[in-house]
């Protein structure tokens, strides 16, 4: 008895396809034929099997049997050839099929899991297909390869999981391949399958470097003995004795922070000399203060298993695949866990780089999205967001009716007309609470936005701006804002985004900030893409790998969902 039934009209015949853990039931032209997948009857030819599999969207042969999200594409792929096998000729796998299987088995080199594409199952499938006593295996082999290949291509090209599932403002829909056409035109008869598949990854230098770093760390991880460095109640300063010197030496050499030819005394437990320099290098690569002290955070990173670093690189590759193709244009990129902004030129090289302050990990996370920067405002007003008005400004007014005047704020109508900048009356307070009036901060040195804001209009009300709190840039962890991004060198960034205007440079930007007109807007000649991203692993152009803390917990969240397997949430 079929457990799941789906009726479709195909070429004038009604086919009822359903899967249980054992049989596939097919109702063809009103006749019920029950056939075990592993032991199909002679009446059930290969084409009928492929039709049934494609219709069902369920295939127990697969590690992840539910391929309903690819069902239509699998159907379209086989309909073109009237459901004849694509990867089997005369009972033998095609050369292209064998090459594809080899790629799937090595998916880990691309940051993917080979078992998601049945990596360990192909040897048995090949053996069964070549066994004359195992009838009907061609359809099973062919369908399995088609589904796994479609999943692999999508995963490697645009990621396994849609970033919109996390409410990220990144759209991968425009990156989607027409998979039936892709397989049919580029792979079924390909002369070089590997060359075709090499083209499906993101075409970004940073992605390629991350991929190379992943493969390097995959080699390093089995070489590490995993010994933990001993903790210390207080930081270990250079020149101090430390029981972990030998382990520290081995680890830093393995990671490349300590050159292999550097001599370290074998019989000494003193933490000193080149070993301190190696720790400074390690600290620099992990977003820590490079002071050479073995403090709690440094020891935590040193004791992080290399397998976890492999996972960080895999997750970073997944996020690289979400990026729009126009990522190669001149652009501004902010990486939240790194607390860093980079502006890239026409050649894809960083033209400008600076530290940033991002949203607090608790309740004020900076969102992940992409928008175009369109204008710059010098000496801006700060229009207080409604959420901050309700949660912070109104309670402060209740405690001190002169709060508005003391902080350089003013109450305005939605049209921008000033109501008051003095003591707040009960009537005005009531209208503020009801959302009928707004609050903004006057331009000037104490303004929360500083003296310039760089605008890329978005639904999150997030933008780049300067800040009067420059001292916060001295911190290694800089999640202090309500969501907007504060930049360390605002005049430099303003001059860069206005660089195609001959009369704008750093000096003029500084003048406009210090003594220019209030709320002066300057439109960009050409919009500049701004990408707010989240990557806890970054690889420099020189190949140096940097790891950062998962401050928002997004790595853990993504890792948990990836572990659930196909089908992934849309």
Image (cartoon, rainbow, N blue to C red):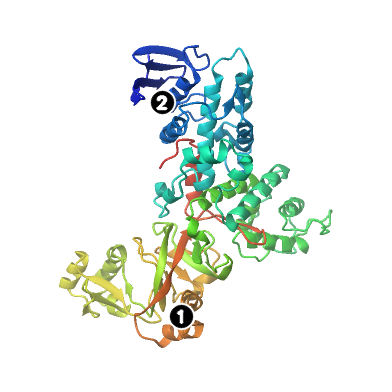
Residues under numbered marks 1 and 2 in contact, where contact means CB atoms less than 8 Å apart: no
Residue denoted by label 1: 501
* Above or below 334: residue 177: above
Seen at 61% across and 29% down, the residue is 94
Relative placement, left or right, of 117 versus 242 is left
Q: Secondary structure at mark 1?
A: loop
Residue 305 in view, yes or no: yes
Residue denoted by label 2: 56
Q: Residues within 10 Å of mark 2 (few under 14, many from 20)?
A: many
* Above or below 115: residue 301: below
In primary-sequence order, the first of circles 1 and 2 is 2
* Above or below 203: residue 7: above
* Occupied quadrant, residue 298: bottom right
Q: Residues within 10 Å of mark 1 (few under 14, many from 20)?
A: few
In the drawing, what numbered circle is on residue 122?
A: none
* Occupied quadrant, residue 481: bottom left
Pinpoint residue 502: horizontal percent, then vertical percent.
48, 83
Pinpoint residue 381: horizontal percent, then vertical percent.
33, 76
Pinpoint residue 300: horizontal percent, then vertical percent.
61, 53
Q: Secondary structure at mark 2?
A: helix
- Name the one closer to the observer, 567 or 337: 567
Pinpoint residue 57: horizontal percent, then vertical percent.
42, 29
Residue 272 in view, yes or no: no
Q: For the C terminus, give its image quadrant.
A: top left
- Name the one closer to the observer, 443 or 324: 324
Seen at 41% across and 79% down, the residue is 451
- Name the one closer to the observer, 493 or 91: 91
């Amino acid at each position: 008895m079929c457990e799941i039934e789906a009726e479709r009209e195909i070429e004038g015949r009604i086919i009822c396809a359903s899967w249980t853990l054992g049989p596939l039931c097919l109702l063809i032209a009103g006749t019920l034929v029950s056939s075990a997948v592993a032991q199909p009857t002679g009446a059930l030819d290969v084409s009928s099997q492929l039709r049934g599999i494609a219709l069902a969207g369920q295939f127990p042969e697969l590690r992840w049997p539910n391929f309903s999200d690819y069902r239509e594409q699998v159907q379209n792929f086989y309909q073109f050839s009237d459901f004849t096998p694509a990867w089997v000729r005369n009972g033998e796998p095609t050369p292209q099929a064998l090459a594809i299987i080899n790629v799937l088995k090595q998916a880990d080199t691309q940051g993917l899991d080979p078992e998601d594409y049945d990596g360990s199952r192909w040897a048995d499938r090949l053996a069964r297909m070549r066994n004359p006593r195992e009838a009907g295996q061609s359809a099973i082999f062919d369908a399995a390869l088609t589904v796994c290949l479609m999943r692999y291509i999508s995963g490697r090209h645009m990621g396994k999981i849609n970033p919109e599932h996390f409410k990220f403002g990144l759209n991968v829909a425009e990156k989607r391949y027409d998979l039936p056409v892709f397989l049919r035109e580029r792979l079924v008869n390909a002369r070089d399958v590997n060359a075709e598949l090499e083209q499906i990854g993101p075409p970004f230098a940073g992605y390629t470097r991350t991929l190379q770093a992943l493969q390097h760390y995959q080699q390093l991880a089995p070489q590490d003995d995993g010994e933990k460095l001993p903790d210390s109640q207080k930081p270990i300063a250079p020149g101090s004795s430390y029981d972990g010197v030998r382990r520290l030496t081995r680890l830093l050499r393995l990671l490349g922070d300590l050159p292999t030819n550097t001599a370290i005394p074998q019989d000494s437990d003193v933490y000193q000399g080149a070993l301190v320099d190696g720790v400074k290098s390690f600290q620099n690569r992990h977003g820590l203060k490079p002071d050479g002290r073995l403090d709690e955070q440094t020891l935590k990173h040193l004791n992080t298993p290399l397998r976890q670093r492999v996972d960080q690189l895999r997750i970073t590759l997944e996020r690289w695949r979400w990026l729009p193709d126009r990522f190669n244009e001149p652009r501004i990129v902010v990486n939240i866990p790194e607390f860093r902004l980079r502006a890239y030129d026409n050649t894809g090289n960083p033209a400008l780089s600076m530290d940033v302050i991002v949203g607090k990990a608790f309740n004020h996370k900076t969102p992940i999205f992409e928008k175009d920067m369109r204008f710059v405002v010098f000496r801006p007003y700060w229009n207080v967001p409604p959420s901050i008005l309700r949660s912070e400004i109104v309670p402060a007014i209740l405690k001190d009716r002169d709060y508005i005047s003391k902080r350089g704020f003013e109450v305005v109508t939605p049209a921008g007309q000033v109501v008051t900048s003095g003591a707040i009356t009960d009537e005005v307070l009531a209208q503020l609470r009801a959302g009928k009036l707004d609050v903004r901060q006057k331009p000037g040195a104490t303004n929360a936005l500083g003296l310039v804001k760089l605008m890329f209009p978005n639904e999150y009300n997030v933008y780049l701006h300067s800040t009067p709190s420059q001292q916060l840039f001295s911190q290694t962890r800089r999640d202090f804002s309500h969501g907007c991004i504060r930049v360390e060198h605002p005049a430099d960034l303003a001059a860069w985004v206005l660089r195609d205007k001959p009369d704008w440079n750093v000096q003029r930007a500084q003048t406009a900030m210090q003594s220019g007109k209030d709320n002066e807007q300057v439109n960009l000649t050409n919009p500049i893409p701004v990408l707010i991203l989240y990557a806890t692993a970054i690889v420099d152009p020189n190949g140096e790998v940097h790891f950062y803390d998962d401050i928002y917990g997004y790595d853990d969240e993504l890792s948990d969902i990836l572990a659930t397997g196909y089908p992934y949430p849309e």
